Amino acid sequence: MANTEHQDFDVVVVGCGVAGLSAAVAAADAGARVAVVERSTYEERGGNTRYTAASMRMKSENEVSDDFESFLVRYSGYHIQPDFVAATALDYENWPSNVRTLPFTDPELISFFVDSVPPAVAWLKQHGVKFGGIGFYGLTPRPTPRIAVSGGGLQIIEAMTAYAEQKGVRFFYELTAQDLLLSEDGSVAGLKATQKNSQPLMLHGGAVVLACGGFEGNTEMVIRYLGSKGRYLRPVARGGYYNKGEGIAMALRAGAAPAGDYAGYHAQPIDPRSSATEAIVMAFPYGVLVNRDGQRFVDEAPGSIDAHYEETTLTIAEQKQGIAFCILDDKINRIENWKRCVRSDRPPETAPDVVTLGKKLGFDGAAASRTIAAFNQACRPGNFDPKILDGLATENLTPRKSNYAVPLDTPPFHAYPMISSNTFTFGGLKVNTNAQVVSQSGDAMPGLYAAGETVGIYYGRYPGATSVLRGAVFGRRAGEHAAQRCASARARAG
């Protein structure tokens, strides 16, 4: 039997994205000895953060958008019992235990998140992260403002990793977290992990921070929680494939309370022919969407693309084989800059007629031709304007198209296949404002923290451009509190 290797630290962080790096840096700045466990290679470190544009729902570096808090509140849970809601008006310490473990986002957690965003941005800047503006995939104005990290998530990874290494943080790459180590009194005392040669490694410490993403890279968990449509989903970027859900699973085994919508995920429409990161297709408001049977199934343009693409994409996931087809006619090429709505590295399929397109892409082209003929008849005269919500709608057609309803009658025709990507899952762990994981009994689990996608705070709808901020805010807090815990333990030990 192989000998098991043991190493000692104060804080063990699982995951190397914005949440894990924020936790590691905060803990190291507070004087803790820190280890970071990362499943990937050094070259692919960073999970989803490495590939994101790192957009942030903020007016400026000092102020969140006007709808930031209200959006979180609106999508904070489902049908909570009124007397439980009333109990949240009490100080948190006086909440009944069953209220503390409810699957909803606690009001004080939302307030903490919102209030902590500008300080977290300033803190990231102090550690070498730079901020600026961001491009947009739509042609109409974005309804809410955004800023972004200059250079995207990769710049976060590079800046924060470099700083952490300077502070003496020890990184373990190609190491997979497997389970929590518990002391006799039930507190978390480290992590059991497996090296790529299958040899075990025990990392002992006074605190563990789980910042290892959701479960979008684990097919079994995706289908278990999201249902049969999960078989057709794939992560939006390579980093998501490393997110296997072990952090969530090991905490649940240890008695953690679940939170977040386990049946939900952040959906983006992508071209399945492409291997590019975030190969989104957002041109569908200017055409029609049909499924494999050649039928329309959704209003392609109910409002601004930024506000409605996720709902449309979730509907695509419910179609046969989880796929749809965006059909455009050649008038699309008259729209200035329309190609910025598409980030696939594959051109659309093009053909002189829709029947031929169907043969190329695998949908019923004859049925789609009839669908488009009916759509064309339902279009009405008006002024088409792709840069505003033009109100040019169909009449007597189900489903209705609310904007940009112009006949598709100019060959050649173009089509993109579209599937729903699983950008990240919503189900995760319940935490308090110290980023401590909450147990099923409603108490903080001693020595256990969570941050980033591993925390469950979203229900039903993702408030766009808040996930990187979630990682930074709760990662930073987890690292600070974990380091304080370890320092206090050392002081008590003399």
Image (cartoon, rainbow, N blue to C red):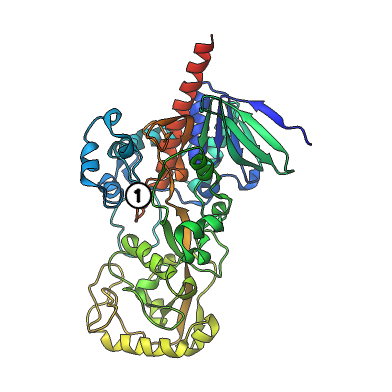
All told, the count of numbered labels is 1
Residue under the point 24% across and 76% down:
392
- Looking at the image, residue 230 lies above or below residue 205: below
Indicate the quadrant where residue 162 lies. top right
Which quarter of the image is occupied by the N terminus?
Answer: top right
Instruction: Using a 10 Å C-alpha cutoff, classify the residue at mark 1 as few (fewer than 14 neighbours), some (14 to 19) or many (20 or more).
Output: many
Viewer-proximal residue, 203 or 329? 203
The residue where tag 1 is placed is 146
Residue under the point 51% across and 21% down:
486
Which percent across, then down, holds residue 343? Answer: 48, 64
Which percent across, then down, holds residue 361? Answer: 53, 80
Residue under the point 52% across and 73% down:
347
Viewer-proximal residue, 9 or 442? 442
Which percent across, then down, holds residue 186? Answer: 51, 28
- Looking at the image, residue 288 lies above or below residue 116: below
Residue under the point 73% across and 39% down:
199
Indicate the quadrant where residue 290 lies. bottom left
Look at label 1 and name its amino acid. Arg
